[in-house]
Image (cartoon, grey):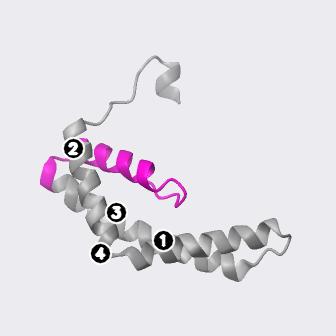
Amino acid sequence: MLARLLGRRKKEPDLALISLAASAIREYAGKHAALFERAERLREKADRLEKAGIPSESAANRAERARKEVEAGLLALRASFASSVGGSAGERAFDHEVERLYPTLGVQGQ
């Protein structure tokens, strides 16, 4: 936000790196589909209970633990991806794709 106020624009990730990141993320997600599905299912359950006026700390905690498992795996993949394609540009491309592919998980890069 501050960058926008000062007239600086965020560097856009390279399209070729975005494509590589998308492939890596999809491959990882395919191999760990149960983990992603569990995180989404538990988040939906916690949200549903909250909206019904029956907040469940237990459900919220399970959903958060599942989200953190997904996040930990994606952060490890991000580090590996960035080191193989050239550092910060790879990180930006990876973060861009994670946010695009999994907006409801709330997983973000470092």
Three-letter amino acid code at the position of disc 1: Lys
Q: Quadrant of residue 17?
A: top left
Tell me the SS state at disc 2. Answer: helix
Kindly identify which residue carries mark 1.
68
Location of residue 84 with respect to 68 vertically, above or below:
above
Magenta range: 84-110
Disc number placed over residue 17 in the picture, else none: 2
At 29% from the left edge and 44% from the top edge, which residue is drawn?
A: 93
Label 3–label 1 contact, CB within 8 A: no
Disc number placed over residue 76 in the picture, else none: none
Location of residue 16 with respect to 24 vertically, above or below:
above
Q: Mark 2 or mark 3: which comes first in sequence? A: 2
At 46% from the left edge and 26% from the top edge, which residue is drawn?
A: 3
At 63% from the left edge and 78% from the top edge, which residue is drawn?
A: 61
Disc number placed over residue 75 in the picture, else none: 3
Tell me the SS state at disc 1. Answer: helix
Between the residue at mark 4 and the residue at mark 1, the CA separation in whole angstroms equals 17 Å
Q: Mark 4 or mark 2: which comes first in sequence? A: 2
At 29% from the left edge and 75% from the top edge, which residue is drawn?
A: 31
